[in-house]
Image (tube, rainbow, N blue to C red):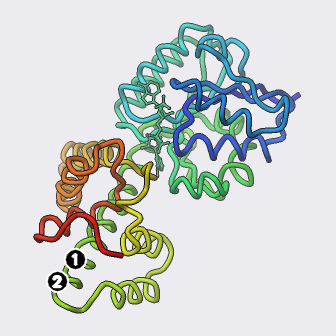
Amino acid sequence: MAPQIMWIGLGNMGRGMCSNLVGKGDLDKPLILFNRTKKRAEDLAAKFPQGKAEVVDSIEEGVKKADIIFTIISNDAAVKETIEAILKADVKGKVIVECSTIHPDTTEQVAQEITAKGGEFVASPVFGAPAAADAGALIFVPAGPRSSIEKVRPYIKGVMGKAEIPFEDKPYGSALKLKLIGNTFILNMASVLGEGFTVAEKSGVGVEPVKQFVDTIFGGVYSAYAERMSKGTYWRMEEPLFSADNARKDAGHAMNLAKSSGAEFKLTEVADGYLKTVAEHAGGSKGDIAGIYGAARKHSGLKYENDS
Ligand SMILES: NC(=O)c1ccc[n+]([C@@H]2O[C@H](COP(=O)([O-])OP(=O)(O)OC[C@H]3O[C@@H](n4cnc5c(N)ncnc54)[C@H](OP(=O)(O)O)[C@@H]3O)[C@@H](O)[C@H]2O)c1
């Protein structure tokens, strides 16, 4: 019999991950769904075939029935609150898989709380945008005891993910350290593109040739962000794909990690400065990191919104 799975957190990432779990996860019981805003859970459950998901009113109610509990929510405070709620139930023998991007110290702390109560813990942040979550193409970074990771593996490759960068029998925090370092690449890329497009416009070269350069030389994620910027999606989108608040949280944790390791993330400081402008202009929970282009424009005397 397949384990009973529960999912906590149905934001941009969680919804796509659950859809793949329900579609390809070989579950023989309904996926238990919990989200702080219950309507999101109800709306998602309504999209699945009858009997494939069950919405619960409280975390405790779901945890009591579940064998494996996934969480992917905004930030450290939300994760701590959620783990506290999980621990209201008996977690002995259950596996908690925490996929949010949080500080490595927070991960270690919640892992300690869960394992002290007899639960198993896997830290598994993910790389990939919401589109990759929808496509089941995330890259998972699982850390923790190999035996616990093995219990989660059936739901990773070919279900929610396309690959793993595992830290088996390694500290939980290792996964989060990699995740934070990786996210600085994304933040810095957004700054490189935002500044490049801005200077192209101000110097008379124009945005389109720079976009062609990016598409032909780099492609991939660079092209996806270049598209979101040059086409003006960054200021038209109603909901962000990667909110300024979440990006600033990642930048702060990454800079803290560098400092505590005796190193520097100077470029991330620049990206964070742009993100501050995005949050001030569009709202921290509404602005998207591609809005770094709007911020670079603003810092150069142009308006935030481009004319695409
Ligand atoms: N977006 C990306 O590109 C991306 C990629 C990889 C990893 N991540 C990481 O994955 C996590 C989720 O990202 P996301 O883009 O899905 O975020 P999101 O769309 O902003 O969704 C956030 C989720 O967290 C819940 N939440 C927020 N505060 C809470 C609290 N105090 N208690 C309980 N639940 C709370 C929200 O519930 P409500 O519905 O009630 O607001 C929602 O389910 C973050 O740690 C993020 O850094 C994001």
Q: Residues within 10 Å of mark 1 (few under 14, many from 20)?
A: many
- Along the viewing direction, whichever of 234 and 135 lies nearer the viewer: 234
- Along the viewing direction, whichever of 280 and 242 lies nearer the viewer: 280
Residue 198 - label: 1
Residue 227 relative to residue 192: left or right: right
Amino acid, disc 1: Thr
SS at mark 2? Answer: helix
Q: Are marks 2 and 1 in contact (CB under 8 Å)?
A: yes
Q: Does the numbered disc 1 mark a residue whose Cβ is under 8 Å from ligand 1?
A: no
Residue 133 in percent (x, y) is at 60, 52
Q: How many marks?
A: 2
Amino acid, disc 2: Lys
Let me know if residue 297 appears in the view: yes
Quarter of the image for residue 212 reads bottom left
Residue 207 in percent (x, y) is at 31, 84
Quadrant location, the C terminus? bottom left
Residue 202 - label: 2
Q: Residue at x 25, y 47 (%)?
A: 279
SS at mark 1? Answer: helix
Quarter of the image for residue 7 reads top right
Residue 163 in percent (x, y) is at 63, 57
Residue 71 - label: none
Q: Residues within 10 Å of mark 2 (few under 14, many from 20)?
A: some
Q: Residue at x 25, y 53 (%)?
A: 278
- Along the viewing direction, whichever of 72 and 305 lies nearer the viewer: 305
Q: Is residue 144 above or below residue 200?
A: above
Residue 178 relative to residue 152: left or right: left
Q: Residue at x 39, y 37 (%)?
A: 102
Q: Does the numbered disc 2 mark a residue whose Cβ is under 8 Å from ligand 1?
A: no
Q: Residue at x 89, y 28 (%)?
A: 1
